[in-house]
């Protein structure tokens, strides 16, 4: 797996074999319907995807520089933690000034928790102001990066 970071630094990790198996026991064959075979196949695929997801998360986590990590110290994911997390990230913007979508993954980021954080920003003007100021700073950082880019051609 090759990881290319926003600063163009790279790291490569070795190959790892992942596998899953589909087992049909001899005594199951007589009653094996097409539907049961599909269910077994689907279970095998789910197992393989689970292994791939674990592998990718593990490798990506091990490659994140310490300066870009955030220890929530057991806190629940809330608006303040979201701001702290976003402050550590490089955020890119579209030409119209809207930020690129940010995708998060992990047990803290359930749809319910993300919705609660959104409501927390809406209901707390102080947090909303802090968030807006942080995003303005990120937009200026993006503009500086774009101005420094060397165009090819």
Image (tube, rainbow, N blue to C red):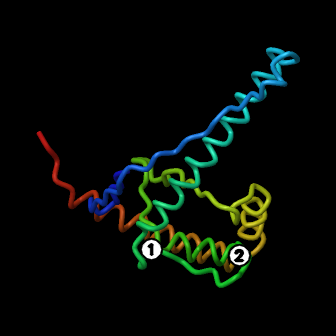
Task: Name the spot of residue 7 as percent of width and height, x first.
Answer: 29, 63
Q: Nearer the viewer, residue 45 or 97?
A: 45
Find the residue positioned furthest to the bottom: 73
Q: Nearer the viewer, residue 150 or 104?
A: 104
Task: Name the spot of residue 149 as percent of width and height, x first.
Answer: 21, 56
Secondary element type, mark 1: helix
Numbered tag placed on residue 68 in the rendering: 1
Q: Is residue 48 above or below residue 142?
A: above
Residue occupying the point 61% across, 41% down: 48
Numbered tag placed on residue 89 in the rendering: none
**Figure quadrant of residue 20:** top right
**Figure quadrant of residue 124:** bottom right
Marks 2 and 1, the one that precedes in the sequence: 1
Q: Is residue 17 above or below residue 31?
A: below
Q: Residues within 10 Å of mark 1 (few under 14, many from 20)?
A: few
Task: Name the spot of residue 23 as percent of width and height, x first.
Answer: 71, 32
- Image mark count: 2
Residue occupying the point 49% across, 74% down: 87
Residue occupying the point 33% across, 55% down: 4
Secondary element type, mark 2: helix
From the image, tell me which residue sits under label 2: 125
Find the residue positioned furthest to the left: 153
21 displayed left or right of 150: right
Residue occupying the point 59% across, 72% down: 131
Task: Name the spot of residue 136 as percent of width and height, x first.
Answer: 47, 68
């Amino acid at each position: 797996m090759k990881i290319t970071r926003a600063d163009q630094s790279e790291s490569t990790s070795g190959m790892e074999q992942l596998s899953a198996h589909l087992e049909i026991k001899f005594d199951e064959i007589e009653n094996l319907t097409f539907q049961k075979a599909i269910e077994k196949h689907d279970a095998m695929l789910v197992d393989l995807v689970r292994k791939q997801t674990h592998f990718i998360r593990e490798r990506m986590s091990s490659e994140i520089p310490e300066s870009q990590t955030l220890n929530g110290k057991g806190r629940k994911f809330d608006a303040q933690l979201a701001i702290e997390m976003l402050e550590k990230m490089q955020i890119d913007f579209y030409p119209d000034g809207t930020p690129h979508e940010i995708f998060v993954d992990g047990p803290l980021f359930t749809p319910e928790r993300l919705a609660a954080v959104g409501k927390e920003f809406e209901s707390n003007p102080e947090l909303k102001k802090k968030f807006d100021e942080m995003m303005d700073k990120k937009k200026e950082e993006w503009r500086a990066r774009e101005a420094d880019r060397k165009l090819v051609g």
